[in-house]
Amino acid sequence: MNKRVKIIGAGLAGSEAALFLAKKGVKVTLYDIKPRAFSPAHKSENFAELVCSNSLKSDDVYGNAAGLLKQEMRVIGSEIIAAADKTRVPAGGALAVDREKFSALVTERIRSEKNITLVSEEVEKTDDDGYTIIATGPLTQGKLCDEIEKLTGGGLHFYDASAPIVSFDSVDMENAFFGDRYGKGNGDHINCPMNKEQYDEFYDMLITAERADLHDFEKSEVFEGCMPVEIMAARGRNTLRYGPLKPVGLKDPKTGRWAYACLQLRKEDEAGSMYNLVGFQTNLKWGEQKRVFSVIPALKNAEYLRYGVMHRNTFVNSPLCLNPDYSLKTRPTVFMAGQITGVEGYVESAMSGLMAAVYLERKLSGKPEILISDKTVSGALAKYITTENENFQPMNANFGIIPPLGEIVRDKKEKKRLQAERSLAETEKFIKQIKEN
């Protein structure tokens, strides 16, 4: 194997991909603007810098999808998770790290790898020949951004405004009903009615809830593209009742009339296991989202598969332009990895870099393509971001994207445990397949 791979970006995804390929004997040229320059969000000269939290979320393999994803990555051979395990700090059931030691360790491993050549410069375009992995993260800009738009047919989003997603199983259907406005449609929405007292309590909590911090370069720009529900609410007590909580045309079967206010949930996946809160883009802190939205009767016990986020986040329309192996449909020698693909979160970004590298190494070696099963979190995320979706938004690891079991399991904990066991078995099967083939 004498082909060289160009990797653009030494964040979590790019670092993961570079280390995996280098250890497989692939010559890698890793490009990053550090330490010559920094993006507005980065401060350290080290690679794989954790910009926000130092937590890689739960380490519970059998009860949390993020924990399960990390275990899948350990099985596959993730250098990022290995570095996190080595630099972890006490954080209850979560895998949290000393962020400086973590980034320093990843950087040391990259610099000491004989098959990796580091180049500190801003890349403006991909090569016309050879293989490239673009892992430039959610702050991609400039001429490279123009190049990516050209390769993907446009569709880059610059300010990510996402509403929360809840599991269908956790919606209290005693306080909700299926139906579309004025009976038009196939009854695809779940409607969550509120009376005046419930709405007033919700409103008062919403406008006083704590919001997530934004970087200075985001503050004046993020909200221009999509209004957060809490900002909209601040315009007046009844603003939401004429906006996303408009009850018009939604007859509650219990009362035979319209509610005082009504939140609609829209199906997020074909199986109907996930629903998003329509019009509820929000910048509230995650704990506040759960606290405030739980006041809505139908959501009192809701399980949040993804919380709402609002921040600068460049990502491509992956369902239209990416293959399941993270390569571009228009140029299969170019792969993409990290948040730019529409995966959301530290671990998810690293996973995409790992899997892109696994698939690329097989392509370089002339081996047949073998994709990891969508019964794993890794495979399910890849399938989610590459499956047609007109309302495509970034997604993080959650059990809702994994195909259901072949049996009905009422107990939620037991259901997750069985899904996790199946996922790890499929991961082991994948590793065996790629070693044998």
Image: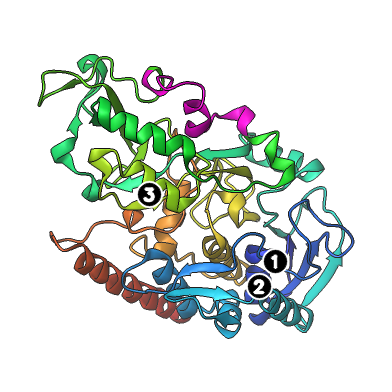
Return the disc, 3 or 2, that comes first in the chain's sequence: 2
Question: Is residue 237 part of the magenta span, yes or no?
Answer: yes
Question: Is residue 234 part of the magenta span, yes or no?
Answer: yes
Mark 1: amino acid: Glu
Please identify, in this view, whether the residue under mark 3 or under mark 2 is nearer the observer: 3
Q: Specify the quadrant of the image occupied by residue 63.
A: bottom left
Residue closest to the eye, 236 or 68: 236
Please tell me whether mark 3 sits on a helix, a strand or a loop: helix
Q: What x and y, as percent, mark residue 375?
A: 33, 63
Say whether residue 169 is left or right of residue 371: left
Please tell me whether mark 2 sits on a helix, a strand or a loop: helix
Mark 2: amino acid: Arg
Residue 428 has which mark?
none
- Mark 3 highlights which residue? 290
Say whether residue 201 is left or right of residue 53: left
Residues at discs 1 and 2 in contact (Cβ within 8 Å): yes
Q: What x and y, as percent, mark residue 260?
A: 26, 21
Marks 1/2: CA–CA distance: 7 Å
Marks 3/1: CA–CA distance: 29 Å
- The residue stretch that appears in magenta: 223-241
Give me the residue at 31% from left, 29% from top: 199
Residues at discs 3 and 2 in contact (Cβ within 8 Å): no
Residue 99 has which mark?
2
Say whether residue 424 is left or right of residue 4: left
Return the disc, 1 or 2, that comes first in the chain's sequence: 1
Please tell me whether mark 1 sits on a helix, a strand or a loop: loop
- Mark 1 highlights which residue? 49
